[in-house]
Amino acid sequence: MQKGYIRRIGLGTMALLATAVAAHALRYYATLDNVWFGVDPNIKAVILQVPLQALTHMFVAPVALALGPLQFFPGLRARHPTLHRWSGRVYVLACVVSGAGALATSPFASGGWVAGLGFGILAVLWIGTTMAAWISAVRGKLEWHRLLMRFSYALTFAAVILRLQILIGFALGYGSYSGMSPILAFTSWIPNVLIVALYSALEARWRSRGFNESRPARARHVERLSQ
Ligand code: HEM
């Protein structure tokens, strides 16, 4: 019961933060009309250097960020399996397209080559885990699908963690985003991945000991997805 509450609050917070960051990214559509309101001058320079790659990333990535949380609500997943499948396909496509844009933008990252390296590794892992998660769903390997999608979204959620860490960076005295981005290009995603790994390992242990409240919901999910 308590576990269910904590889970719902966690998912709700994740969805709210993701929606807020995705909505904030909509300002990049105005750059097509040469309106740069709210755009960091260093990011503007990146866009002007590689507009196709950078804007493909910035326009499409928010779709993955906003859609992702829907996939994790157990009630929604169990009651609307078709919606789960279709929003999952859009999520995968958004990750792969915007991940390719991010990978091509990484060498031009405003924070220099260290930032570029961090974002480049993130982009490769993002595309890789998302594709692997999708392939495992198609092949009916649903336990793998669940695990890999958790990792995929942990990487997508780097967008939120990075923006929260920017606030911490300014509070610590960094003068600009580009100054802190060589660190953020790593700290925005490595902790997320470790948290998912730890949570999934603990969950597997609880399940092997028989503490599995959500087993009926999971069984229904597996059953419906394989229909
Ligand atoms: C998870 C893999 C991701 C990678 C590898 C990645 C990579 C990058 C890179 C290299 C830049 C250029 C920034 C710079 O010069 O320092 C950038 C900027 C940006 N990215 Fe991503 N990104 C990812 C996820 C996302 C997501 C999920 C969103 C959704 C909102 C997003 C939205 C943006 C936006 C709006 C910018 C422009 C800068 C800003 O306003 O903060 N990215 N990204």
Image (cartoon, rainbow, N blue to C red):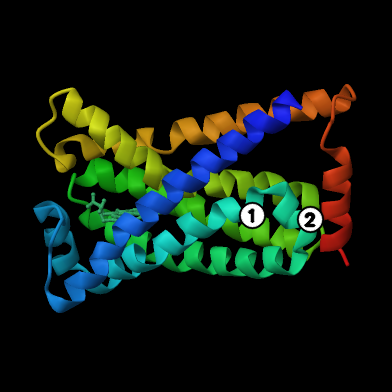
Residue at coordinates 76% horizontally, 27% vertically from top-left?
A: 1
Horizontal side of residue 136 vs 223, given as left or right: left
- In the displayed structure, 129 sits above or below 104; it is above
Q: Which residue is mark 2?
A: 78
Q: Quadrant of ligand 1?
A: bottom left
Label 1: few (<14), some (14–19) or many (≥20) C-alpha neighbours in 10 Å: many
Disc 1: which residue: 71
- Quadrant location, the C terminus: bottom right
Residue 104 is situated, as x and y percent measured from the top left of the image, at 32, 63
Numbered-mark total: 2
User: Which residue is drawn at the image coordinates 38% and 56% (left, top)?
Assistant: 22
Q: In this rendering, does residue 166 appear at all?
A: yes
In the image: residue 54, left or right of residue 15: left
Q: Residue 149 in the image: state x and y as whole percent.
A: 63, 50
Q: Secondary structure at mark 1?
A: helix
Instruction: Say if 28 sits above or below 113 in the image.
Output: below
Q: Identify residue type, mark 1.
A: Gln
Q: Position of residue 204 (x, y in %)?
A: 78, 30
The CB of the residue at mark 1 lies under 8 Å from ligand 1 = no
Q: Secondary structure at mark 2?
A: helix
Q: Nearer the viewer, residue 26 or 207?
A: 26
Residue 135 lies in quadrant: bottom right
Viewer-proximal residue among 88 and 8: 8
- Pick out the residue farthest to the bottom: 33
Residue 10 sits in which quadrant? Answer: top right
Q: Amino acid at mark 2?
A: Ala
From the viewer's perspective, is residue 101 above or below residue 212?
below
Instruction: Please name which of the two marks, 1 or 2, marks the residue nearer to the observer.
Output: 2
Q: Is residue 179 above or below residue 44?
A: above
Residue drawn where x is 53% and y is 69% of the image: 93
Mark 1–mark 2 Cα distance, whole angstroms, equals: 10 Å
